[in-house]
Every structure is written in C-alpha cells, then in structure tokens.
Image: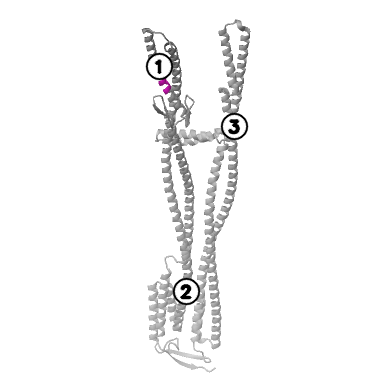
C-alpha cells in the first residue's frame, strides 16, 4: 500500500513528465516489482520449509512421547510387580526372623483389627477369628528362628533337670537295695521268714525299678527320650528355617536391585516423555508464530506487487509526448462518463455493504477520491484490477495453508481417536477386573464357611472319639479284672464241688447246686470276656488298621470279631477313624481351594491397581492429544469464521470487483485505446 500511495501521484502528473522520465519511472517500478516478487517467492519457499520442519518435528516429538509412554507403562507394571514381590519377601523373612514377642504382637494386632470390625456380626465369627489367630501362631512355631531357639533352650534346660532327677531316683534305688541287703544279713535265718520274704520283695521291687530306669522303660527315661527328640526336631527345623531365610534374603537382594534399575529406567523414560511434551508445545508455538508472520509478510508483499503492477500498467498506457506539447482536452460526453463512473462506484459500495467486506469498502472510498481527479478513469480501473489480483493471491495462499492444516488436523484427530480407544479399553479392563474380584470374594466366603463347618464336624468327632476311647479303656480294665475274679471264683468252686466224691442225696444235691452256680458264673465270665474283647478291639482300632486281641492274634479293624455263640461285632472307633480321615481330607482340599482363591484375589487386586493406573495414564494421553488437536485447530481455523465461508465471501468480492470493472470497460469501444473513455482531443503542438 505504501507503493500505491507513491504510484498514484505519479499517475496524476504523468501528462507533464517527459518520455525519458516516464521510462525511468517505469524501469524503477519494474525493478521494485522484481525485488518484491523475489522476496515473495523466497518467503514462500522458506515458509514451505518451515511448515515441513514443523510437521516433521511434531511427528518426531509425538512419536517420542508415545514410545516413552508405552515404556513408562511397561516399567510401571514391572515396578509394581517388583514392589509386590519385595513386600511379600519381607513379610516372609519377618516370619522367619522376627522375635517371638514381636511376631505374636503383630498377629494379635492383625486379628484384633478383624475383631474390632465384628460389630453386628455373629458370635461364631469372633470364635473363628480367635481360632484362626491360634492356628497362625502354631504355624509359626515350625519356621520362626527366635521361637525355635527359645524352645531348644527351654527343652535343653528341662532335659538337664530331668536327667538329674533320674540319677537321683537311681541313687535312691541303690540306697534301698543296700539297706535291704544289710537288713537280711543282720536278721539271718533266725528271723521270721515272712519278714525276710517281705524285705526280699522290697529289694526285688527296687532292683526292678532301677533296671527299668536304666533300660529306658521308666517314665523318667521316656521323658528324656521325648525331650531329646523335640530338641533334635527343633534343631532340624531351625537349620531348614535358616537355609530358607537365607534363600529369601538372596531373592530380596536381587529383587531390590531389579527394582532400583527399573526405577532408574522409569525416571529416564519420564524425562524423555517430559522433553517430548515440551517439544510439542514449543513446536506448536513456534509454528503458529511462523504461520502468522508469513501471513502478514505475504499480505504486505502481495499488496506491493499488485500496486507496482497497477502503477506500471497505468504508466505504460499513457501516450508518449512528441516534444513539448500542450493539450486542450475536452470531453465529448463528459456527463455520461461521470454517470457511468458514479453507477460503478454505487454498485461497488452496495456489494461491500451486502458482503460486509472491509476491503471493498476501502477500495470504494479510494475510487471516490480518484474519481474527482482528471485521470479518475485510469485510477479507478487500476485500483479494481489491483484489488482483484490481491484477492486472488490471498485465496491461493489460504488454499495452500488449508491443505497443510487439513493434513495435520487429520493426523492429530487420528491420534486423539486412538488415545480415546485405548482409554475406553483400559476402563473396560478395570470394570472386568472389579467384577472378577467380586466373584472371587463370594467364592472365598462360601469356601471359608464350608471349611469352618468341616472343622466343627472334625472337632466334634475327635471329642466323641476321645470320650469313647476313655470309656473303652476303663471298660477293658473293668471287664478284665472282673473276668479274672470270676475265673478265680470258678476255680475255687470247682475245687469244692467238681472234685467232691461220695454218695447220698446231700452230696448229690450239693454237687447239683454247685454246678448251677459254676454254670452261672461261667456264663457271666463269657459275657465279661466278650465285653473285654469288644473293648480291646475299640482301644486297638482308634488309630490303627489292625490290633492284637487278648490271645495275641492280629485281627484287621475293618473285619469283625466272633464269640463262642457266633455273635459278631464291628469296631465303632474304626468307622469314626475313617470318617475322621475323610473330614481331614476334605479340610485339606478346602484349605487349598481357599489358598488358591486368596492368591487369585491378591493377583486380581494387584491387576486392578495396575489397570487403574493404566487407565489414568491413558486418560492423560487422551487429554494431551486433545490439547495438541485444540492448539492446531486454533492455529489453522479462525474463530467463528470457517474456511468455506471465507472462500465464498472472497469469491463474491472478486466477482463484484470484476462486475464493476466490466461496467467501466463497456462505456465506449475506445476504452482500450484511451483510458479516459470516449474523449476528443484538440492538440496544439508547440515547437521545440
């Protein structure tokens, strides 16, 4: 526009400039035009290169961001897995090495928290929780090193005490034997045989007692043996516990090293992602700035080129003067020409108002100004031509920019859609995992109830078997003692009645009565013996598959015993034992199922946390893609003014200007030869 402001005064005074001066002006303007066109081309090439660089940089940063995000997701999952493994190892090591008091306090605290949540629950829940706590403490006795060391120390002290007591008892027996020998020696044969016999029995009893202790048949030696076995067992378990804990500590060390390496890699990937995200933002800002700068430069250069082109065209259409001439110019139809020009300006102003075009309004105002000057026709036409050229150039430039924007917007919309799809998939995965957790917890509660019922049945059965065992042992002792007493009585009666001879009714009657009593006692003895046999079978089959009856014969517990009258008896305790084994098997199966469900719940819980973090990450990626797309849309699309609307409006502006140009160029057939319209000239030359 600054060149147009210089060109129009040159046109207004063109009639008074000599031919050489006009040629010089045209040459200068052409040089300026060439420079402007070169600048325009250079800026267009530079902008194309900048646009390509922007696209490449954006693609590179976006790819870096996506790759880093995927690696972060993977490393985060690895970190969570390692943290879970580390926590599990630390808990397991604590069971091996934590002091007995601390470990018991930890378990009590855990179950106390469970007890504090029992408000509104059944009483049996509290009983089950207490039982679970006791079972957990018992389980730790076989692996906890401080506990086993304390047990070994305690049993060792008890072993020393027991050995001392045994030695003391042996010493007392020796003293008793010596005393008895001394009494027998002193009393000699003169003493009562009954007393000596009693002393000898006492000595024999002491000797037998000492022999039992030395041979390990005494309860004292049995206790020593039990304590030594407990100490040996605890030492074996302690060695196994130390080996296991050392292995776990090695695994923990390895896991900790892996965790540190993973966190280091995770930090590097987060730094890469942050750099890529920053690069996207900086690239977007710099590219937007470059696009705006190019638009401003292109508009300025296009205006300069259009103005220079119009000025050159106007100068080239002026007739060359032949020497110094003076002109008397008179319009043959000046009034008609002014009317045509006024109609053209009115049409142009009307189009500007209808289209709401600031450009048409500006050019209409300039045409009104130029129309008041002697060369208004040339000025008006040149301005219209310049404006048409400028609008067409702007339309071409915006079309190129629109294509670039359309391509990049399509790519970014695709990235946004992909991120949205990933986010929806992550949401679905979280919901599925939550549903699976609900199912597993329901199955766990059901299986825990089944296990509790089985344990209750087993406890009741064991209690019944213990009561039965005590009953049958007492019964066996009672029946054996009764049987022996009956046998002794029968023998005494047989000596009296069975072997008595003689004749007479009295002796016969006495023998008959004695035989009846003996028969009665023998039947009673058989009943006692049968009851003793049954009790013997029950006491022998409580924890074995066979037993030795009172005759020393081995009989299977799954069979029957038969008395002299062919009566049969099956072991009640053996059936109870079979049922106990079945219950214990079912309890083991149920416990394994519970362990499997708990492992599944732990796995799904870890997966849920991982999937929730993945969902948050995917949501972050989606929001980033939306922000990038929004920034590009704001850079490529004018707010409230779409490309199609601007294109249509510009086409209407161009059409309106061309219509105005057509009106001006059709006013006379001589318009192509003389830019002033149908004018007549009276030229009077002044000789040089």
Choose mark 3 or mark 1, whichever is in front: 1
N-terminal label among 3 and 1 = 3
Q: Nearer the viewer, residue 238 or 657?
A: 238
Could you classify mark 1 by the number of other residues whose Cα lies within 10 Å: few (under 14), some (14-19), or many (20 or more)?
Answer: some
Q: Nearer the viewer, residue 433 or 188?
A: 188
- The kind of secondary structure element at disc 2 is helix
Image side of residue 33 versus residue 571, left or right? right
The answer to whether one can see residue 634 in this image is no
Identified at 37% across, 12% down, the residue is: 512
Q: Nearer the viewer, residue 560 or 42?
A: 560
The vertical placement of 524 against 1, above or below, is above
N-terminal label among 3 and 2 = 3
Instruction: Point out residue 231 in the picture as x, y percentages from the top left corner.
Output: 59, 30
Identified at 44% across, 51% down, the residue is: 430
3D distance between C-alphas at marks 3 and 2: 99 Å
- The kind of secondary structure element at disc 3 is helix
- Residue labelled with disc 3: 232
The C terminus - image quarter: bottom right
Could you classify mark 2 by the number of other residues whose Cα lies within 10 Å: few (under 14), some (14-19), or many (20 or more)?
Answer: some
Q: Are marks 3 and 2 in contact (CB under 8 Å)?
A: no
Instruction: Point out residue 582 in the picture as x, y percentages from the top left corner.
Output: 44, 36
- Residue labelled with disc 2: 394
Query: Outermost residue, front direction?
Result: 503
- Residue labelled with disc 1: 521
- The kind of secondary structure element at disc 1 is helix
Q: Nearer the viewer, residue 407 or 432?
A: 432
3D distance between C-alphas at marks 3 and 1: 55 Å
Question: Magenta span has 525?
Answer: yes
N-terminal label among 2 and 1 = 2
Could you classify mark 3 by the number of other residues whose Cα lies within 10 Å: few (under 14), some (14-19), or many (20 or more)?
Answer: few
Segment colored magenta:
522-530
């Amino acid at each position: 526009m600054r060149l147009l402001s210089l060109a129009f005064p040159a046109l207004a005074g063109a009639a008074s400039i000599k031919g050489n001066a006009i040629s010089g002006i045209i040459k200068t303007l052409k040089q300026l035009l060439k420079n402007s066109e070169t600048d325009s081309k250079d800026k267009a090439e530079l902008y194309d290169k900048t646009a390509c660089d922007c696209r490449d940089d954006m693609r590179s940063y976006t790819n870096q961001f996506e790759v880093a995000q995927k690696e972060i997701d993977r490393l985060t999952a690895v970190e969570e897995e390692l943290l879970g493994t580390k926590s599990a190892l630390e808990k397991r090591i604590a069971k091996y090495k934590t002091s007995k008091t601390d470990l018991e306090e930890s378990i009590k605290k855990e179950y106390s928290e469970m007890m504090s949540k029992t408000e509104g629950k059944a009483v049996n829940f509290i009983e089950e929780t207490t039982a679970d706590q006791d079972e957990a403490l018992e389980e730790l006795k076989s692996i906890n090193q401080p506990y086993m060391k304390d047990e070994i120390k305690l049993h060792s002290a008890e072993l020393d005490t027991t050995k001392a007591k045994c030695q003391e008892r042996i010493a007392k027996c020796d003293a008793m034997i010596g005393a008895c020998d001394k009494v027998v020696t002193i009393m000699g044969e003169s003493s009562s045989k009954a007393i000596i016999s009693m002393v000898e029995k006492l000595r024999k009893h002491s000797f037998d007692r000492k022999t039992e202790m030395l041979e390990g048949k005494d309860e004292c030696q049995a206790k020593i043996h039990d304590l030594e076995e407990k100490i040996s067992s605890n030492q074996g378990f302690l060695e196994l516990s130390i080996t296991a804990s050392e292995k776990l500590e090695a695994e923990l060390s390895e896991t900790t090293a892996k965790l540190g390496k993973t966190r280091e890699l995770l930090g590097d990937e987060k730094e890469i992602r942050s750099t890529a995200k920053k690069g996207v933002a900086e690239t977007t800002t710099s590219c937007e700035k470059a696009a705006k700068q190019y638009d401003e430069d292109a508009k300025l250069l296009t205006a300069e080129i259009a103005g220079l082109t119009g000025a050159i065209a106007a100068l080239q259409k002026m007739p060359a003067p032949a020497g110094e001439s003076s002109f008397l110019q008179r319009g043959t139809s000046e009034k008609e020409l002014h009317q045509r020009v006024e109609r053209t300006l009115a049409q142009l102003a009307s189009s500007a108002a209808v289209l709401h075009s600031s450009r048409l309004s500006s050019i209409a105002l300039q045409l009104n100004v130029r129309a008041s000057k002697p060369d208004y026709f040339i000025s008006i036409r040149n301005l219209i031509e310049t404006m048409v050229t400028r609008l067409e150039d702007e339309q071409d430039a915006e079309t190129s920019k629109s294509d670039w924007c359309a391509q990049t917007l399509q790519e970014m919309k695709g990235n946004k859609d992909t991120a949205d799809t990933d986010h929806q998939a992550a949401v679905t995965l979280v919901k599925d995992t939550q549903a699976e957790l609900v199912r597993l917890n329901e199955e766990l509660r059901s299986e825990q109830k089944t296990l509790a019922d089985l344990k209750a049945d087993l406890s009741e059965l064991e209690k019944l078997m213990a009561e039965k065992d005590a009953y049958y042992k007492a019964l066996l002792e009672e029946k054996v003692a009764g049987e022996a007493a009956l046998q002794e009585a029968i023998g005494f009666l047989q000596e009296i009645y069975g072997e008595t001879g003689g004749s007479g009714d009295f002796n016969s009657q006495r023998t008959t009565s004695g035989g009846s009593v003996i028969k009665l006692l023998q039947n009673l003895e058989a009943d006692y013996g049968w009851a003793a046999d049954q009790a013997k079978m029950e006491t022998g089959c409580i924890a074995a598959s066979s037993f030795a009856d009172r005759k020393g014969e081995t009989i299977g517990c799954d069979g029957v015993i038969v008395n002299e009258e062919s009566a049969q008896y099956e072991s009640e305790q053996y059936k109870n034992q079979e049922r106990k084994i079945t219950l214990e098997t079912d309890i083991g199966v149920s416990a394994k199922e519970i362990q499997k469900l708990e492992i599944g719940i732990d796995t799904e819980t870890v997966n849920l946390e991982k999937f929730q973090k993945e969902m948050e990450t995917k949501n972050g990626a989606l929001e980033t893609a939306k922000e990038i797309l929004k920034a590009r849309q704001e850079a490529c699309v004018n707010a409230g003014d779409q490309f199609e609307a601007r294109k249509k409006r510009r086409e209407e502006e161009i059409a309106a200007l061309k219509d105005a140009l057509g009106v001006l160029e059709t006013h006379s057939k001589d318009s192509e030869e003389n830019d002033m319209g149908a004018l007549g000239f009276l030229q009077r030359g002044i000789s040089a």
